[in-house]
Amino acid sequence: MESECISPLGNSSGNHLSVQVPLKFPFIIGVAGGTASGKTTVCDKIISQLHDQRVVLVNQDAFYRSLSNEQLEKVHEYNFDHPGSCFLDAFDTELLLSCMKTLRHGRAVSIPNYDFKSHKSTEPSRLVNPSDVIILEGILVLQDFHVRDLMNMKIFVDTDSDLRLARRIQRDTVKRGRNIENVLDQYAKFVKPSFEEFILPSKKHADVIIPRGADNDVAIDLIVQHIRTKLGQHDLCKIYPNIFVIHSTFQIRGMHTLVRDTKTTKHDFVFYADRLIRLVVEHGLGHLPFTEKQIITPTGSVYTGVVFCKRLCGVSVIRSGESMENALRACCKGIKIGKILIHGEGKKGRQLVYEKLPSDIASRHVLLLDPVLASGNSAVKAISVLLGKGVAESNIIFLNLIAAPEGIHAVCQKFPRLKIVTSEIDASLNKDMRVIPGMGEFGDRYFGTG
């Protein structure tokens, strides 16, 4: 997924402060192939396996131009598979491009509803909401370079021509109310020549070719794995290999929805924040070193497992970081937890006000706890305190629920050997240095002091 910067708070008159906010684009997949090649079935299989993501399917067929009464009188002479010199004659590609660009920029759009029996677009149109993944499926979606340029992945479904013809006969006679003679005549006169002249050559633009169409489970599994990898990799993770964002699911997104909602009660905020914190802590513990160990199970069998790192402690940045202590104690029985209080901004910047740390902290791996990484100023100061106590930079794992790009840059550029584990990377900071979209003053909401 790519990103660009927008300025939601600025305007041409310059009356508002401009804040650069990275806009996340969806992962757009183009799926082309001959008529009845199994494109839709391939798309359905991809969608069913991406059950943890918001996925929407857009059919190029929806953008067929409505035929005039004059054209309807000669419908059997009309070629529905022929592109023009610039945009498709059969398809309203200008409208298709407009709709795809709207979705790409995170806005809902109305997609035409084309009726194959009347050869006209009918009401109501279909409202399509922005999604993480957009699949654009159609015979000619790889033929036009304007459409191709929008895609992150291009797929061509390659199926035997005899099988495609058999499927087309069944589809057009059963679902579209056409007689077999007209179907065969149209296939010979328009469909087959257009496939050979326009559709088949577009295969050269494909990143992935799927032989045997929807029957090729191995190819579909590989495609889904690639999409998951791309979706799970934030742009900042490509810059800083020491950032780890836990895999997003609908459960995690649902919890984020609740803790971010200004209408959520304190009780629910604490409940779902605690669930998210536990997930982050568990993920953070997975980055600790381990040693292998063989043990004997109650059945007398040998099991090869691992032993956790024992030299470990937590350090919470007062006061929001204290909300993460219970989850850490629940995962690590008897763990020592230290405290750091950072305060002030102004000319002197962030200053250490208070610290109470284990006396042997220099020999331990440290889980630094702070639910929100905003500007990074407090984090940088807290990490500097730990380094001053002799803690190795590579032994620090910084755990938070949300992180702003500005904070990530500040921490990772100064401390490239520590690890940051978070559940979501937010858009940016506003003029008040608050994370947006954010979740407000975390400490006040969690402890009920707002």
Image (spheres, rainbow, N blue to C red):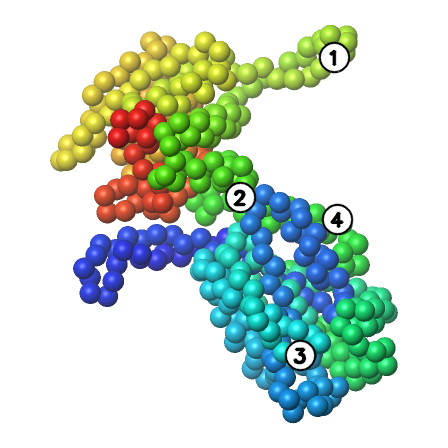
Query: Residue beneath label 2, please?
Result: 232
Image x and y of residue 93, in percent? 56, 75
**Mark 2, other Cα within 10 Å: few <14 / some 14–19 / many ≥20:** some
Q: Secondary structure at mark 2?
A: helix
State yes or no: discs 1 and 2 in contact (Cβ < 8 Å): no
Give, as a three-letter code, the residue at label 4: Val
Query: Residue beneath label 3, please?
Result: 119
Report whether 420 appears left or right of 50. Answer: left
Image x and y of residue 402, in percent? 40, 37
Separation of marks 1 and 2 at Cα, in angstroms: 36 Å
State yes or no: discs 1 and 4 in contact (Cβ < 8 Å): no
Give, as a three-letter code, the residue at label 1: Val
Q: Is residue 245 above or below residue 224?
A: above
Query: Residue beneath label 1, please?
Result: 302
Report whether 75 appears left or right of 250. Answer: right
Q: Secondary structure at mark 1?
A: strand
* Residue at figure coordinates x 35%, y 33% from the top left: 372
Quadrant for the C terminus, please: top left
* Residue at figure coordinates x 74%, y 12% from the top left: 302
Q: Is residue 366 above or below residue 65?
A: above
Give, as a three-letter code, the residue at label 3: His
Query: Residue beneath label 4, please?
Result: 218
Q: Is residue 147 above or below residue 225?
A: below
Give me the disc on residue 21.
Answer: none
**Mark 1, other Cα within 10 Å: few <14 / some 14–19 / many ≥20:** few
Report whether 86 appears left or right of 82. Answer: left
